[in-house]
Structure formats: C-alpha cells, structure tokens
Image (tube, rainbow, N blue to C red):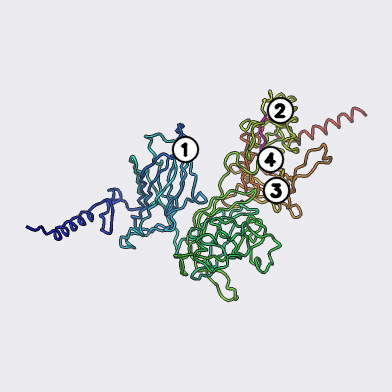
Amino acid sequence: MQIPWRNISWVLLVLFAYNCQTCNGQDYGGEEKPAAPPPEQETCDGIFITYNFDGREKIYPLVKNVSAQGWSFKSMLTVLNAGIFELKSWQVFVGFQHKELLVSADGAVAIDGDGFPVRVGKNGTTLAGYPQSDLKTAIDTAGDFTQMSAQINIKGTQFGLKEKTNPMPTTIKLVNEGYKCPAPKRYKTYMHVCCKRDPKFKPKKVITKFMPRRYGDLSITYDVLSAFANRYQAQVTIDNLNPLGRLDHWNLTWEWMRNEFINTIKGAHTHKIDPSECIYGPQGQYYKDFDFTPVINCQKKPIISDLPKEKANDDKIGKLPYCCRNGTLLSPIMNETEARSIFQMEVFKLPPDLNRTALNPPQNWKIVGTINPSYTCGPPVRIDPSAFPDPKGIGIATAVASWQITCNITRPKPKAAKCCVSFSAYYAESVIPCNTCACGCEQTSKCDANKKPLLLPPEALLVPFENRDLMAKAWSNIKHLGPMPKKLPCPDNCGVSINWHVDSNYKTGWTARITLFNWGNNAFENWFSAIQMKKDVANGYENVYSFNGTKLPKEKSNTIFMQGLPGLKFLVGEVNGTNPNKDPRVPGKQQSIISFLKKNTPHINVDGGDGFPSKVFFNGEECALPPEFPKNTAAFKSKFGVLPAVLLSLLTLLVLTDWLH
C-alpha cells in the first residue's frame, strides 16, 4: 500500500502551526490573553500605581567591596487612571534608596535632573510623563488603556546590594495636587498603591482648556508663534515672580527629545555655534540639500544666554522687548519691567513630526546664574495659548500652542552656599565669623574643613581670610579663649559676606547694623539684600537709614528688603590697600543702621537671640548663618545700650571739671 505522504505532510504542518499559534513564548499576530489585574486594581477608584522589579545582574568592574559593586537592573512603573477625573501632567515619586543611577525611563523624564543618566542617590526622584503626560478616564475613552495608563520601562545601576538584598524602593506615590496616597502594599519584587482624591481638596474652577498657569519662583513660557510642516517659530519668556528671587548672567539649557535644531535665534545667543552635529547626524541625512553653514546650534542640550545691552538695537539679533540686559532678571520689587527676559528662535523638526500640529517642547529645563538662588525646574505643562498685542496694533494675537515650565528656589546644601553671615553684638567682645567652608572647600590638606571657626576681634572682618590667622591667635591669647588647634579651620570661601551686628537695646526700641562685604573682583550692580526675622520681630521695623528699605507685605511680612539708594547701587569689588606692598586688599563695603521699635513687639528678647535674623539673602541667594549667637562677655555694658554709658561719662567730666576749679 502506498502511503499518501503529501497529505500527511499537510496535516503535520497544520498541527505544527496550531501548536505554534497557541504557544505563549512568542506572539506572531495571535491575540494574547492579558494577565488578570490584581484585586486591588479592581477596587481602586483613583490612580493605581505599580512598581515591578524585573531583575538585576552584576556589572563590571567586579569588586569584593559590596558597597562599590554595581548592579544593572530593570523595572517597570505603571500609572493607571481608574477614577472619574482626568489626571493632568502626572508625576510619581519613586523612593530609590540604593544609590541608583537611572540610565533611561522610556515614557517619562526625571523632573529633578537635566536628562538621563540621572544620579538619584538615596533620596529617590520624581518621574513625570513624557510624551504622554495626561491620563484620561475610562469613561471618556471607552476603556482604552492606551489613553488611561502609562508604562515606564526603567533601566539603571544600583550600588551597595548583597546577593540576597531586596532591591525595591522605599515607596511609590502620586505627587499631583489634590491626591492622598497610603503606604504601598509591598511584596518581594512588586508593590502597588491606590491614590485617591482628597475629599477636603477644593480644586479651583478651571475655565481653561488646558492646565491653568501655576505660580513658581521663576516661570518660563514656551510659545509657538507660527507653525509650518517642518519648522516653527518659538518664543521663550522668563518671568521672575519671587520678590526675593534674582538672576545675573543667566544660562538656560534644555534637552531636545526629537532631534530638533535651532536655525536662527534673536534676543539671545547660544554658547556654541557649530553645525557639524547636524551635518553628521540625522538632521543631515534628512535635509540632504540644506545648507547648514548658517545654522545657529545643533546640540541636543544647547546652552543659551542673554545678549549684552549693546545689542538691544541690532536689526538682526536684537530689537525685541525685554531682551538684551546681559542676563539680569531683577526682583519684581525693584523693577517689574526688568524682571522679564524674552528671546525668539526658529526650530526645525524631523520625521515623523512633519505636520503643523506635531509640536513637542524640549524637556529637562535648567537655569543658573552667578551669586543667585539655585532653581529646580519642572517639566513643560500645556497651558492655554498665550495672548500678545497684535503687531498691526489691532486686537489681540494668540500663540499656536503654549507650555509653562515652573522653577522653584531650592535651599542651598550645607557647605554649598554662595554667601555667608557673621554675627556680633554690642554686649560681646568677639565676632562669630562665617562657618568653615560655608561656600565649599576644594583643598583641605592645610586646614580642617570640619573645625569650628575661630572667634575674631571686630576689626578682623575688614581683612581677607589669609590675613586673619595672626589676629585670631593674638585675640585668643588676649581673651584666654583656649589653646589654638594644630590644624586651623578652613576659610569660608565666600565671594560675599554679611555682618549682622546688634548695635543697641533700650527701653522703647533697638538697633542693628548690617555690613555687606564684596571679596570678589567684580562689582554687583543693582544689588539687594533681605533679612527674615523670627516670630513677629519685623513688625517693629522703623527705618533703614543708608539703604532703600521696605517691609514686605502678606506672606513675607517678616522680611525686610533693602537695596542701594540712587548713586549707591553698585557694591564695588575688592581693591588694593593704601600700600599694596604691605597692606592687605580691601573689600567693597556698604553699611547701614536699621532701627526697630518695641511698641508692636513688647515681648521680644533682643539680647537672647531675637535680635538676629533667621535667614539672610543677597541677590536672592540664601546665605549660610552661624549656628550660634554672640554671648554676653562684657558684663559692664548695660542691657540698655550706650546711652547710660554716655550720660555717666558726661557726669564724670562735670565732676572732674568742678574739682579742678
């Protein structure tokens, strides 16, 4: 009998195809049944967040020291909107704790970094959605999970883990306003939490299509003024909104996420003008016949600065309102007009974004200045299009699309300030100088970075730190302050220092003296300083005599704001002494007396510490304060100040005069 091999082969082929189709190892087009969601997801009526650790492995170099051994890891963060309210601009905090270095997070950006890789350390980080920043509801999408949820594939490196250590973060939680998250439910490699709307939260009535504008210490607006298929015209507006904020010589940077490049720019300039990255990159492959020679910048992370004042009327790069001030953003209290900067640029796009509506703002914004506050910027948030006066002078023109980037001032870390404060008082003989390494220490081989600073005589504040050693040693011997350490404390290394001196204390009021020292070579134009007092001490503020001073209202009512009077708005730099061969250099200095009345603050204890500020600012930067106040070492001085002493001297003089006669 002849075996029908042809028919049998067809049967075997069908059976093989059927087995392959039902195999779960790979998917060749068959519809795979999704895994059942956890029971907690089914009962969540808010935002359901999960973190799944997918695995890790050792990476080179292989070392015996556990704390130095690196592990590469993969994990997935999932954010699902299971509620009835759309979630705008979602942000999730992940409590990484193993010195993580995040190499990538597909579908999100780290809001406290300037692009991947991001060194997280042990404090965790907040991830924000990009490009899908809004999560709609199941009601609005008929249960479309692609619009309701976001999956973030995370890759990174961990340190300090043993073979069997749990590699999970400490927590996960939604940080959007109006939500509360309980502690997550934890498993070995998986954790989840359901964050619900706070019943006490009363959202503002939103009359805008997109997110309402948010308040920040610094607000940056990215407006698309006109759009074409392969390019668009953008305007960047930087607004300083904090009365204690300021920027000098600002440098702004961001990260292009879709290979965009800046063709032209007006009102600012890029630090690097080099088209080579376009010519050899994907830009050159697509725009083959394009002349890249005049292109301004092709960097993925360009650095942009303001133009000097001389370029304000330049026809090609100037003639924009609020431009060309050499990178100065003043406090809005000083000048509202000069609290804003604007520049414009033409941006070219690449496939697949070749249509008018494919508009993606850059991410990972960062802005820095000189002796200014440190700012942390959030991700761009879509807002209603900005409105501008029509160029023709008729009506109002609106932008094609607008995004807001909100930046807030961060408090300087210990030994990372840019200015410092010393304390002194009429009742104390010694000055408590600025903290050791208040503004950082690079070389500590010849000094002690952790030693407490030495007490000084008042006149030592007028000389540079390298000339204070002999004065400090002599003062210690005269006042019997104890033996000198073999290794002296390091200097404060601050370019600006401020001395706060409690000058007098009498029945109806008291006075203080503030002195500003500039130890750098450059002058500070339009400088300002501010002091925040404890409790309600500032309610007794009367006057500042050599500066232009004012007490701030409302939420900053405990703050006194000071700036130079007309003609005294420059805090000059350090200059040579009278005889440069033997005299030390002399710092730029300005000084004023501040008077307070006790009528509104009858219970304050000036000598007990209430006469000293809790915070001091210079040009927006929070200065490092000493950890203690001067102690009363001059018992012969009255707590009522110098007035009784003067009267006693006059009485003595009269008695002696009468005796001589």
Image coordinates of residue 198 in percent, x first then y, are 39, 51
Relative to 392, residue 189 above or below:
above
Residue 237 seen in render: yes
Relative to 98, residue 486 above or below:
above
- The residue type indicated by label 4 comes to Trp
The residues colored magenta run: 488-495
- The residue type indicated by label 3 comes to Asn
Q: CA distance from mark 1 to mark 2?
A: 65 Å
Instruction: Please give the residue where the numbered disc 2 appears in the rendered image.
Output: 635
- The residue type indicated by label 1 comes to Pro
Q: Is residue 185 left or right of residue 98?
A: left
Q: CA distance from mark 3 to mark 2?
A: 29 Å
Q: CA distance from mark 4 to mark 3?
A: 16 Å
Instruction: Please give the residue where the numbered disc 1 appears in the rendered image.
Output: 61
Q: CA distance from mark 4 to mark 2?
A: 21 Å
The residue mark sitting in front, 3 or 1, is 1
Neighbours of disc 1 within 10 Å: few (<14), some (14-19), many (20+): few
Q: Earlier in the sequence, mark 4 or mark 3?
A: 4
User: Which dot marks residue 543?
Assistant: 3
- Farthest residue, direction left: 1
Instruction: Please give the residue where the numbered disc 4 appears in the rendered image.
Output: 500
What kind of element bears circle 1? loop
What kind of element bears circle 2? loop
